Amino acid sequence: MDLRLNSIDKVSPLNRKLAAMSLSICTYGNPILRKKAQEIAEVTGEVHELATAMLEIMHKERGLGLAAEQIGRTERIFVIDIPADSDVGEDDQRENPDIEMPLVFINPKITGHTEDIQVGEEGCLSFPDIFATVNRWYEVDAEYTDLHGRVQTIHAKGLLARAIQHELDHLDGILLVDRMSHVKKVALSGKLKRIVKKTKQAL
């Protein structure tokens, strides 16, 4: 199973730069974040360039994952890049040692999961300086199309599984605020209102 992003190199450095410069992170309060993504019918050169731009923006913002809605697009695609030193469990062992990063998921869906739940803190590039405890499945099976147009499957654990679930939420218009407890929402209400106000001023 080829999980590498070899074909991304076909996009010229100039096109990558221009694509990345034309896109920016959409923050909470932007209605695009509530739109459900549309499936990609064909993996074209434009899709390749979009994936490249998303990876560059994600790396620039020091994120681990990024969905199309977060940059104002509605294609059903997200990207993930988890450093090896972050892909470790409680025993300090790699949880997904055979999976090469970065990953591009086109038309992804979760096809199975374990009943084990992982409780952990999540942040989101669309919610600057906001963190909340979120329950996620510890292991998931997912299916997606890669940049070669081939259907792939993946079994993910730990942080990678969490990232897949988080980004898939974005594609369905579900946000970090929707996963927070009521108590957490109340505690963060001031920050959330400020983000919304700043977002609407920028629109």
Image (cartoon, rainbow, N blue to C red):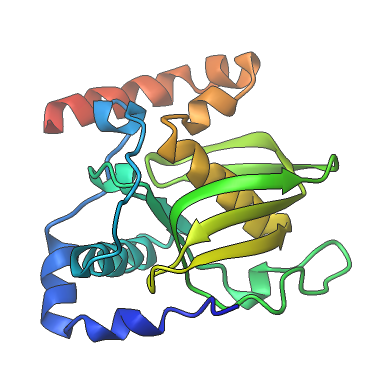
Q: Is residue 146 above or below residue 195?
A: below
Residue 183 makes an appearance in the image: yes
Residue drawn at (12%, 58%) of the image: 22
Q: Is residue 158 above or below residue 39?
A: below
Residue drawn at (72%, 78%) of the image: 97
Q: Nearer the viewer, residue 195 or 50?
A: 50
Asked whether, in this view, residue 134 is left or right of residue 15, the answer is: right
State which quadrant residue 63 falls in.
bottom left
Asked whether, in this view, residue 70 is left or right of residue 176, the answer is: left
Q: How many marks?
A: 0
State which quadrant residue 31 falls in.
top left
Q: Is residue 154 above or below residue 164?
A: below
Give the x, y percent position of residue 35. 32, 29
Q: Quadrant of the C terminus?
A: top left
Q: Nearer the viewer, residue 111 or 133?
A: 111
Asked whether, in this view, residue 125 is left or right of residue 71, the answer is: right
Residue drawn at (59%, 27%) of the image: 179
Give the x, y percent position of residue 146. 44, 67
Give the x, y percent position of residue 166. 54, 43
Q: Quadrant of the N terminus?
A: bottom right
Give the x, y percent position of residue 172. 44, 33
